Image: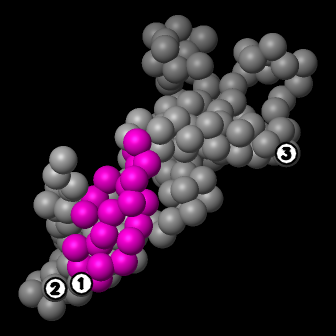
Amino acid sequence: MTSKNKRVCKECGRSFTASPKWDYELCEDCSIIVYEKMEKYWITEALGLSEVLDKFLPSLPRPLFEVALKKYAPIGQYDLGEAYTDKELNEELKEVAAREKERMAKKVPFRTAKCKKCGTPYTVDGIWQYNICKDCAVKEVLNWRAYWVKQVPGIGTMRAGFDIPPIEVNKYLLED
């Protein structure tokens, strides 16, 4: 590795050795945190849903993560005369999130379906393709968690050492 690959993280200030393909002044640990923040933004802000539904939803679109990384790019990398401001970054995040949401939603034609749990009509699209509505999905996830907490005392805590298994969302997929 050359000294060109030695960098200082803009978030935590630690020195790190970057891969030759990594163009950002952000260490691996901090990049994971940025990714998790963007996932939360994608679910709660862009899609307007609860984080509880994360297993039911499409993963974070790459273009959204790339916008978040611009803050950590060397000056001039994106033809900018100076570093990205938070305001510029937030505006671009909103634009990209809206575009990605629309793109994903259009992957499957919009239609109305009836929830298998409560009977409420809801919209099916490229983002939500399940046979239950979003409210019932939240209840299913919470019931799943409650079941495991009851079955395995301390699960999901450091003391137990392991987490609640993810809910199997495939059983809720719509059949064509």
Mark 1 and mark 3: Cα distance apart in space: 40 Å
**Amino acid type shown at disc 1:** Asn
- Kindly identify which numbered label has been placed on residue 143: 1
Colouring: one colour
Q: Which residue is mark 3?
A: 87
N-terminal of the pair, mark 3 or mark 2, is 3
**Amino acid type shown at disc 3:** Lys
Tell me the crowding category of disc 3: few under 14, some 14 to 19, or many 20 or more residues within 10 angstroms, Cα based: few
Residue closer to the observer: 122 or 27: 122
Residue 29 shows in the view: no
Please tell me which residue is depicted at 64% across the width and 43% down the height of the picture.
98
Q: Which residue is mark 2?
A: 147
Residues at marks 1 and 2 touching, judged by CB atoms closer than 8 Å: yes
Task: Please name which of the two marks, 1 or 2, marks the residue nearer to the observer.
Answer: 1
Q: Could you say where residue 158 lies in the image, as x and y percent from the top left? A: 28, 75
Task: Please name which of the two marks, 1 or 3, marks the residue nearer to the observer.
Answer: 1
Residue closer to the observer: 138 or 14: 138
